[in-house]
Amino acid sequence: MGSLDSGRFHGLEAVGYGVEAPEAAQNGNGHVEFEAPYVSVVLPTREESGNVEAVAARLDRVLPGVPLEVIFVDDSDDDTPAAIRRIRSDRPVRLLHRPPEKRWGGLGGAVVEGIQAARGEWVCVMDADLQHPPETVEDLLAQAEATAAQVVVASRFCPGGSVGPFRRARKAMSRVSSRTALTLFPGLRHVTDPMSGFFLVRRDALDLDRLQPRGFKILLEILVRTPDLRVSEVPFKFGRRQAGHTKASAREAIRYLEQLGHLGVGKLAARFGRFGIVGLTGLLVNTLLLAVLAGPLGIGYVAAAILATQGSTLWNFTLTEAWVFADRDHGRSLAQRMGMFFFMNNVALPLRIPILFVLTSALGVHYLVSNLLSLVALTLLRFAIADTVIWGKGAAKMKTAHSYDIHGIVSVTSDARLPELERFSIDEVITSPSIRVRIGSARDVAAGRVRPTVPVGLNGHGPVLNGNGNGNGHLPAIELNGHAPLLNGNANANGNGHAPLNGDRRTLSYVEGRGLGFGIAIEQHADLIEVLASPLLERSPHVLYTNVVEPIMRWLLASKGYALVHGACFANDGEAMMVTARTDTGKTTTCLKLLDRQPYSFLSDDLTILCADGRVLGYPKPLTISRHTLHAVNSPLLSRRQRWGLVVQSRIHSRTGRRFALRIAGMKIPAATINALVQCVIPPPKYQIDRLVPSAQLAPEAQLMTLVVIERDHDREQRLEPHEAVQVLMENCEDAFGFPPYSYIEEFLQGINGGNLRHTERAVVESALATVSASVLGSSTMDWWRRLPALGGVTTRA
C-alpha cells in the first residue's frame, strides 16, 4: 500500500474519493492509502472547469477491475481546481495545481510533472476536453500488452482514425504539422500521428531528464529523444469539445516551430560532436601507427603513412558505426558502409592540397590558419557525406521485438535478432517472457538503468556490488575488486528512495568503456530476467547471445529443473546418443560426418537440454565451421562468396583465435569489447545444419541411451561408471563457458528461487545419466564418426 500524497510535488492533492472505494483507507496521518495503480491517467488542464467532472466520470467506467488513478496537472487561473476537488470517484483522483511562476514548459512541462507524479506501470496522457475518448484507453492498453510496445499512440491518421468534425483548414494544418515532423525526423516514419496528444507509455521506458518540453507536442519530444522505444498505434476518432475553448493559437504554432528547430539542431550538433571526437582519437591512432611502422618495423614513411591511414580509418569506422550512428536504421549493408567510409577517408586527404593552395596563395591566409580551416572544412564535408550518404536514411530505430520459445520452458524477447535461437523463433508476441533483452543507450547502460526510473551506480569501468537498500533509499556499496560487477540487492526504499517495481529485484551491471563498448545491465525479478545491452551488442548479435543470453539460459533452465549441457546429440527411432568433448576437440566435424553418412536425426551440435528423466531436448543452434570442417560433408549449400569468406573467418574464429581471446580476457583490458568489435566486423562462420547437410532431419526430443566422451588420444575405448560420466560432462560444461562476463552472471544468478543452482544442475545430470551407457573413445586420427554408430547401436549405411 502507498500513500496518495507522496510529498514529492508541491501542491499535489488527493481528492475525489468515494467512501465506498474498497481500496481506499485513511492511515494514521490522515493520508489516503490505496492499492498501487497499474495505469495512471495524466490530464493536463487549463480553464477546463466544464469538462473535468465529465471526463472523470467516463474514466470511472474504463478498465473495470484494473487499478487506475487519475492525475490532473492544472495550469488554470479560473475555478478548474475547485471543479476537480468536487469530483467523487471510486478511483484515486489527484490534483497538481501549478501556480503561474511554476508553469515551465507549457503543456509539455505539465505532462512531464504528471508522469513524475504517476505511480502506475503505464501512464496514459490525454486531454480533459473529451476530444480524446476515455474509452480508447482500453484499446491502448490492450495493444501494448499484445505487441510488447513501450509506447502506443492513439492516431488520427492510421486506418480507422479520423481528425473529427473540424473545418477543412484545421484538418489541413494537422496533417501539415505531422508531415513536417516526419520529414525532419525520418526515424518516426512508422508513426502516422507523432503530433498526437493521446498516448500510453510505459513509465520505466522514459528517462525524464532527457526531455526538454516546449509547448504542447510532448509525444514528439519523447519519440525523438528516446529513439529506441518500441512504438505501436491504435486508431481513434477525434471528438467534439464538450465545454470551453481550444488552446490552439498562433503562439502555440510558433512554439511548435521552435520545438522542431530545437530538436533537430540539438540532435545534429550532438552527432557532429561525437563525429569530431572520433576524428580526434583517429589522429592519435594514426600517429601511433605511423611511429611504429616507420620506426621499429622500418617501413618507408610514405608506405607507413598509407598503412597508418588505413588503420586509423578502420578505428574511426568502428567507433562511428557503434557510437555516432548507432541509432540509424541503415539502408546499406555493413560491407557497403565500410567500403564507402574507406573510400571517403582516402579521397579526402588529397583534397587538402588544393584547399591549402587557394587559401594561402590566392587569398593570402596564413598557412597555419589555412591548415586549420582545411581540416575543419574536410571534417564538415566528411560528416555531411557520412550523415546523408553512408548512413544516409537517418532513421532512428523503432524496435520490433524478436520472440523465441524454447520448448515451452523458457521464452525470450529481444530487440536484436538472436541467430542462434532462430529455430525457436515464433511470430506471436510474447507478453510475459522469461528473458527480455533490450538495446539501450550507452548512457543508460553505463548507469545501469535497466528500467530508467531505477538508477544504479557504476564504479570504474568494471562492475560493483550493492547489497540491500536502507530506509532512506541509499544503497551501500561493497566493492569486490577493480573489475567486479555492480549487484543491487532488494531495494526497499522510502522517502527519496526508489521502491522495487515488481517486488524484490537484484541488478547486475558489467560495463566497459562507459557503455560505448561491451555493456550490460541485468535485473532479476521473480518471473523475469531483464537485460539492457549497449548499442555495440546489437551490431554483434553472436556476442550478445553467447556471452549474455546463453549464460542466463543455462542457470534459468537449471532453476526450472533442466540442465543445459555441452554435447552434440543425435537420435535414431527415438533413442539418442550424446557426444561430449572439450572445446575444439573435433565435435562439429564428427557431427557433420555422422549426419552426412548415417541415418541419425539432429538435435544439437554444441549444447543440449537434458531432463532428469533422461530425455534430451533439441537445441539446434547454427554450427560454427571452418574450411577444414566443410570438407567433412559432400554437398553443403554454400555460395562461392561464403566459401571464400571462410578463409578469413576460419583464422579469426579458430582454436588459436579463441585461445588468444581467453588469454586477453585474463588481462586488465576491455576483452569483451574487443571480442564484440572483432565479431562485428568479421562475424563467425555459422550455418544452420540444413545448409551444411541438406538431408539432415531435426528431432525435437529423444531418450538418451548412450554418452560418448571423445578425446584426441591414442586409439582406445573405455567404459565409464555413472559418477565418472557425470564428472566429465560437468567439467566439459564448465569448459564451454568462461569468457567475460560469464563469472559475474553465474554468481549473480545462483540465487534464483533461493537455491544453489550448481547443485540443482548436477542433480539433474546425475538422475539423467543413472542408467545411460557411457564410455570414452580416444582417437589419434579423429575417426570417431566411423566408430560411434557401433556404440549407439545404429547400423552403418551400405
Image (cartoon, rainbow, N blue to C red):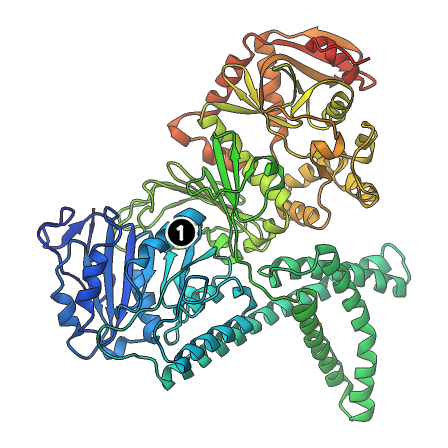
Question: Where's residue 47, x and y in %?
Answer: 22, 77
Who is closer to the viewer here, 442 or 175?
175
Task: Find disc 1 in the rendering and name its residue.
Answer: 144
Who is closer to the viewer here, 341 or 357?
341
Question: Where's residue 354, x and y in %?
Answer: 83, 82
Mark 1 falls on what kind of element? helix
Q: In the picture shown, does residue 284 fall above or below 76?
A: above
Question: Where's residue 71, x and y in %?
Answer: 24, 62
Image quadrant where residue 649 sits? top right
Who is closer to the viewer here, 170 or 265?
170
Question: Where's residue 493, x and y in %?
Answer: 28, 48
Q: Residue at (59%, 40%) from the top-left corner?
A: 545
Q: Is residue 798 left or right of residue 4?
A: right
Image quadrant where residue 375 sits? bottom right
Image quadrant where residue 7 sits? bottom left
Q: Is residue 494 left or right of residue 732?
A: left
Q: Residue at (76%, 64%) from the top-left corner?
A: 340
How many discs appear? 1
Q: Amino acid at mark 1?
A: Ala
Q: Residue at (29%, 50%) from the top-left corner?
A: 38
User: Is the C terminus in the top left, top right, bottom left or bottom right quadrant?
Assistant: top right
Who is closer to the viewer here, 720 or 173?
173
Q: In the picture shown, does residue 282 fall above or below 479?
A: below
Q: Residue at (35%, 52%) from the top-left corner?
A: 141
Can residue 296 be seen here? The reply is yes
Q: Residues within 10 Å of mark 1 (few under 14, many from 20)?
A: many
Q: Is residue 15 left or right of residue 744?
A: left
Can residue 6 be seen here? The reply is no
